Amino acid sequence: MSVKSTPRPAGQKPPFWRDPAKRALIFQLLLIAAVAAFLLYIIGNTQDNLSERGITTGFGFLSNTAGFGIVQSLIDYSSQSTYGRTFVIGLLNTLLVGGLGVLAATLIGFTVGIARLSPNWLIARLANIYIETFRNIPLLLQIFFWYFAVLRTLPSARESMAFGEAIFLNVRGLYLPQPLFESGFGLIPATFLVAIAMSIALVIWNKRRHEATGKRIPAGWLAVLLIFGLPLVVLIATGVPVTWEMPELRGFNFRGGITVIPEFLALWLALSIYTASFIAEIVRSGIQAISHGQTEAAQALSLPRNLVLKLVIIPQALRVIIPPLTSQYLNLIKNSSLATAIGYPDLVSVFAGTTLNQTGQAIEVIAMTMAVYLTISLLVSMFMNWFNARVALVER
Amino acid sequence: MIHNRDMITERPAPKSVIGPIAWLRANLFNGPINSLFTLIGLYIVYLLFVPSVQWAFINADWIGTSRDDCSREGACWVFVNARIGQFIYGLYPSEETWRANIIFAGFFALIAWLAIPRLPFKRWVAIFALVAFPVIAYVLLHGGYFGLERIPTNRWGGLMLTLLLATVGMIAALPIGIMLALGRRSDMPIVRSFCVVFIEFWRGVPLITILFMASVMLPLFLPGDMNIDRLVRALIGITLFQSAYMAEVIRGGLQAIPKGQEEAAAALGMTYWKRMGLIVLPQALKMMIPGIVNTFISLFKDTTLVMIIGLFDLLGIVQAALSDSRWLGFSLEGYVFAAFMFWVFCFSMSRYSQYLERKLHTGHRN
C-alpha cells in the first residue's frame, strides 16, 4: 500500500515526515487530540449551560414520580409510577408495535413479492402498483393518512361498526373479545412447547434418515400438524378451559374485552404496509437473482417441481434475501419512533417526549433512548454477521 | 405431375396465437387457478380503483374559493387550490415569491442538465451546482444583501423547504461521507475505528432522535450566548445522519474498484490523495450514482420528520392547513395532494436510478 522511499546512503535517515509509519502515528495522534478537544469544549459548555439553568445531572430523576398517564401499557402503570417505569412502558410499546409490524410486513411483503413474479399479468401489475405506490410516499404521511383521514373519521362508539357480536370498530379504537383462562389452561402452552420440541426432533431424525437411506417422510407437514394438532387435542380433552369476555357498550363507551387504541392501529398499518413494499422488492430480486440454469439443472436431475423449489431455489434465494430483510426489520423498528407524531406511547413519545419535557434532563433521556436503538441495531448486526458467516458460499 | 405454380397467399397466424384474445388466454386465463386469481384481481380493481376515480375526478369539485363551493360528494380540490401558494412556498411573503421561483427554475434546470446524458460541460455544471448555486440560493432566498428584503427562515416552508433540506443535507453530506468511507478503509487503526463508530452510531439511531438531539441538546453543547437558527439545527442533524448512510454507499463503490488500480497508481509514485482523487474516486463515484440517488430518495422522504421539531415542510404545512377552522374535514384531500407531490419526485428519481443501473451494467447480465 505505502510508497517505499528510495534507498539512501547509510547513516542518512529520511526526515520523519517522509516515513509513512511515523506520519500515520502523528496523524492519528492529531485526530485523537482534535476529538478530545471537541469533547472537552462541548462538555465544558454543557456544564456551564446546565448550571445556568439549574439542572442537576445524573440518573436520580428516574426514581421520581412521573405524575402523568399513559394510554397503553403492557404492564401495570399509574400516574404514581416513576420515570424509570415510563422508560420500560415506552420500550415495551416500541417492541410490541415493532414485533407485530415485522410479522405483518413479512407476510404482506412475501405475498406481494411472489405475486410480482406471477405469470398472471393482472396480479403482477397489481403487485407492482402496490410496491411503487407505497414505497414512494413518506412513512409519516402514511401514518397521518391512516390516523387522521381514516381512523379519526370512523363513527362514534354508539354507531360502531360491528363484525359479528364480538368485534367493534369506532373512533376510539378496535374492541376485541378477551380470552379469560381458567385453571388447567397452563397445560396447553406446555403441550405447545412439547410439540415444538417433538417436531424439531422429527425434522432432525428425518434428515439423518434421508442422508443414510435416501428415504424421507413429509416431516414439515407432520411438524405443522403436531404443533397445532396436539395443543388442540389437549384443549378439547380438558373441556376448553377458556371463556371469552365480550366488549359491551355501556353509556358512551365499550367496557371489557381488549381495546386496541387507534394510534397503535394507524402506526402498525402504516409501518407494515410501507415496509412490506420494500420487502416485496427484496423478495423479488432475491428470487430473480437465482439464475435459470439452477432450475434447469435441478430439472435435468429429474427433481420434482416442489423439491426444485425447496432444495435449490429457496435456499439460494434466502441467502440473498435475508441480509437486506434484516436491515428492513431494523428500519421498521427505528421508524416506529414516528409514533410520537400521532401520540402512540412508544419509547420516543413517552420517554424522550413527555418525560424529557417534565424533567428537563435532555442529555440523560436522549442518551438512554439512543442507547436502546443502538443496542437493537448492534444485536441485529451481530446476528447478520453470524448468519452471513454461516451461509457464505465456501469458495475454493 | 401437377405443379401448382401459384404462390399460396400468406395467411394470418391463427387467432389462438396472436391478438387480444390469445393474449388474454396466455396471460390471464391459462389454467383454472390463474383464472381464479384474475377474477380476484379484477374484483380488487373494481373495489379500489372505481371509487377512487369517482372520488378524485368524476365527483370532485375543482373551481371555487371557499368550502361552500364543494358538494362534498367527491374530493374538494378547491381546498388545495386555495392553499397552493402556502404548500409550495410556506409563509414566504407572496410579493417575494419570484425569488423562490428563480431558485426553483435554476434548481430544476441544473438537475436536468446533469441528468440528461447528451448535454456537454457536465463537470463545470456540477461544480457550479455544488459550489456557486447554494451561495446564490442563500443570498436570494434569505435576502439582506443587495437591497433584497430579509426573510427569516421561520417563514420558509412547503415544498421549497422540503427540497432545500434534502439537497443541502445531501450536498453537505457528500464530502463528509467520502472522508468517512476513506477513513473506514484506512490502514490506521485509530482513524478506522473512529470512522466505524461514527458511521454505526448515526446509522443505528432513528432520525427523529437525531432531530430531537439537534433541537434540544445542540443549544446545550454551544456557549450560552450562541443561538443557532432552528433550520440550521435541523440541517446539522440531517447532514450527520445522511453522511453516515452516504459513507456506506461510497464504501460499496470503493470496494468495487479492483485493488490493482490503486497499486498501479502507487507504483507510479502517487501520494495517497492523488491516488484517491485522480484514480480511485473518479471511477468509484460513477458507479455509486444509483446508490447515491437511492439514499437521496430516502432522505427526501425523511425530511418530513422535521415537522415534529416545528418546521413547516410540505407535510407540515399541509397538516397545519388541515386545522384551519374554515377548511375543517378536508384531511383526505390534503394528504392525497402531499402524497402525490412526494410520489412524483420519488418515483421519477427511482426510475432515473434504475435507468443508470441498467446503463452501468451493460454486458454483465445473465
Image (tube, rainbow, N blue to C red):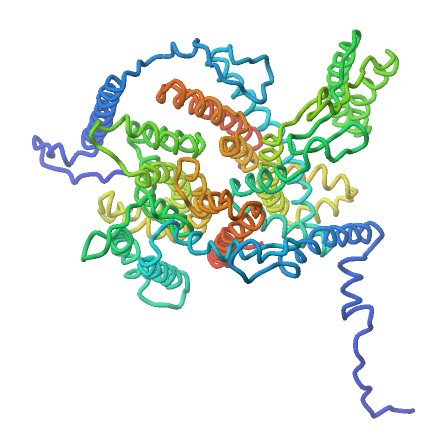
User: Horizontally, is B248 left or right of A318 in the view?
Assistant: left
Give whichever of A222, A106 is nearer the camera.
A106
Give whichever of B293, B223 is nearer the camera.
B223
Q: Position of residue A57 (x, y in %)?
A: 32, 14
Q: Position of residue A151 (x, y in %)?
A: 63, 37
Which residue occupies 8% across, 33% down? A12
Report the residue that reaches farthest toward the left. Answer: A11
Taking the image as drawn, is residue A290 in sight? Answer: yes
Which of the 4 image quarters holds residue A155? top right
User: Horizontally, is A332 left or right of B33 in the view?
Assistant: left
User: Horizontally, is A387 left or right of B161 in the view?
Assistant: right
> Which quadrant of the rendered structure holds the C terminus of chain B?
bottom right
> How many numbered discs, if any?
0
User: Horizontally, is A229 left or right of A169 in the view?
Assistant: right
Taking the image as drawn, is residue A216 in sight? Answer: no
Report the residue that reaches farthest toward the right. Answer: B1
Which residue occupies 9% across, 36% down? A9
Give whichever of B164, B243 is nearer the camera.
B164
Where B232 sits versus A92, above or below?
A: below
Where B217 sits versus B42, above or below?
A: above
Where A356 sits versus B261, above or below?
A: above
> Which quadrant of the rendered structure holds the N terminus of chain B?
bottom right
Q: Position of residue B8 (x, y in %)?
A: 82, 86
Which of the 4 image quarters holds residue B107? bottom left
Which residue occupies 10% across, 34% down? A15
Q: Position of residue B9 (x, y in %)?
A: 80, 86
Which residue occupies 56% across, 39% down? A143
